[in-house]
Amino acid sequence: MELSLNRIVHNFGSLTALSDVSIKVNEGEILALIGPSGCGKSTLLSIAGGILKPTSGEVVVRGSIPDASLNPITYVFQDFALLPWKSVSENVAFALKHHRLSAVEIERRVTNALERTGLKDFARAYPKQLSGGMRQRVGIARALAVSPAILLMDEPLSALDAQTRELLIEDILDLWRRDKPSIVYVTHNFQEALRLANRVCVLSRRPGRIKEIVEIEIPQQDRGRRDVQPRMAELGEHLWSNIRDEAIIADRELADV
Amino acid sequence: MSEARLDKHAPEAAEQAERQLPFRGGGFEPETRTVISVISILSVIAAWQLATTYGLINPIFLPAPSHVASALHSMLVSGELWMHMSASLSRIGYGWSIGTAAGIAFGMLIGLFSVFRSLGIPLVAAIYPVPKIALLPLLILWLGIGEGSKVATIAASVFFPTVIATFSGVDSVPRNLIRMAQSFNVPLGRIAWNVLLPGALPSLLAGFRISVAASLLVLVAAEMIGAEYGIGALLIAAGNLMQTDRLMAGVVVLSALGLTLGAVISYLERKLLVWR
Ligand SMILES: Nc1ncnc2c1ncn2[C@@H]1O[C@H](COP(=O)(O)OP(=O)(O)OP(=O)(O)O)[C@@H](O)[C@H]1O
Ligand SMILES: [Mg+2]
């Protein structure tokens, strides 16, 4: 399934968060959305996920929805958004319960999602008993349980420490290789973008508009190889120089407010 | 270098001496010591008993605890106490349940929809401070002097704090959780039941404490104004006859009732809020 955002403009009152953003998410790709703080990345993702109405512009999907998909466009939240009063398996089941599935099917989907995220032993635990990394795994498991065609991830790892982040990047890549959902991955960490993305879309500071789209032609599994390091470094420098200027100016602007 | 080098400006000699680091406190953690609580209550009762026995207090104004106990005992044996208790319990049971159910429903509506919010909050703000017992004469006109008006007054006294506890509880549910549910297309009813209500539960249970106290207050007042049976009726009758031992027995029963209801709420809090 493809997702197109066409000429999206969004204002919060008198503040223009996004001005005329058009972008297409191709089937099965990981698109990283990167840009300075406050440039409208979350806003854009919320619009893509249908939980925020844009001031103008349209969101269009093209292509068939996979049969098993209960929620074709699915969100993974920065702060995990787990229900603290539900156990891990109940949290995952919460996304399924209203779909008129049989109890067996719900159980199958929950178990499967928990297995794939390494949470099987924590099914009965409550969120407060889990580490940050585990909590975000629950968020990812919940998203997987509905078999999404497009995953929208809003800085899913930014609340986690560096080691956990490293582990989860690997996990996300594994999951992606298996089902090949399209992923829109918002981050302001260009290293994360370099590890994960097929394309990196750089947004300018507020009002957000697309500054550049960088294609990373090296397949994700080869990016650790020694011979591609010069190219990766080159891409990294390019991205960083691009973001750096924007970030410096955005930072000053924020200080003015 | 010495191990206990605390103060750079200390003279050389002091720098050489080893000193223990003083413990500076681990945050204030007051705890209730059950023994002390029991002893303090017992000593108050003992002092009261002694004061009446030695004639420091006129037993007409304040009977000795032993007299209160024997009055309580005889009322218990004769079944009189149960007659009053059951009348009061059924009033408070009906009144509290009706007020709570209506209050939660209305509070949810205020938490969910702008119409109800704009309509409800000023209304609640205007009526909440009115002592609900003031409505009793009006409710008697509407519903008669019987049970209906008493139950309705209790329900009214419970309704308002419950509405406030419910909608402020709903307001305190992180918006992100609601957005999460919406992003999975979860229908409104399920969001209300699985997200808003559990999220509002801590506030709701705190509201129960207030509403239980309010309902006890209104119950006794309403029964004092016009009832044949009930703890309030018992108090007024005993007062008129200067039977202070029976009067105090009624007060003890009320205290026990309040404590029991408080304990039930504490139990619910422990059971229902394990996830916190
Ligand atoms: N509900 C809102 N009301 C008013 N302004 C908002 C609202 N949400 C976001 N904004 C503003 O819109 C701009 C874009 O916000 P957004 O959250 O999309 O940025 P972001 O790129 O995700 O930032 P970050 O990297 O900090 O997450 C910011 O300046 C923010 O202050
Ligand atoms: Mg954001």
Image: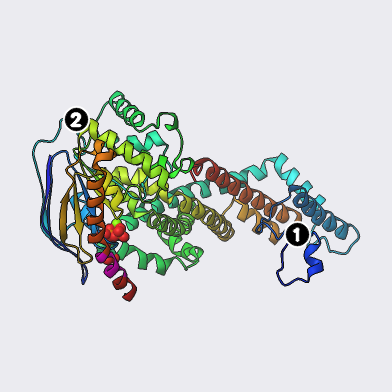
Q: Residues within 10 Å of mark 2 (few under 14, many from 20)?
A: few
Q: Which label sits on residue B20?
A: none
Q: Are marks 1 and 2 on the same chain?
A: no
Label 2: state its secondary structure: loop
Please state the chain letter of the residue tagged with numbered disc 1 in the rendered image. Answer: B
Decide: is B225 above or below A60. below
Decide: is A125 above or below B155. above
> A57 and A203: which one is in front?
A203
Tag 2 residue: A68
User: In the image, residue A77 lies at what x, y percent?
Assistant: 31, 48
Q: Which residues are magenta?
A: A245-251
Location of residue B74 by image quarter: top right
Amino acid bearing label 1 = Ser
Tag 1 residue: B2
Amino acid bearing label 2 = Ala
Location of residue B127 by image quarter: bottom left
User: In the orientation shown, which residue stands out farthest toward the bottom?
Assistant: A256
Q: Residue at x 62, y 44 (%)?
A: B83
Q: CA distance from mark 1 to mark 2?
A: 71 Å
Tell which tag, 1 or 2, sits nearer the viewer: 1
The answer to whether residue A83 is magenta is: no
> B263 and B220: which one is in front?
B263
The answer to whether residue A249 is magenta is: yes
User: In the image, residue A135 lies at what x, y percent?
Assistant: 40, 42
User: In the image, residue A170 lies at what x, y percent?
Assistant: 32, 37
Q: How is the image coloured?
A: rainbow
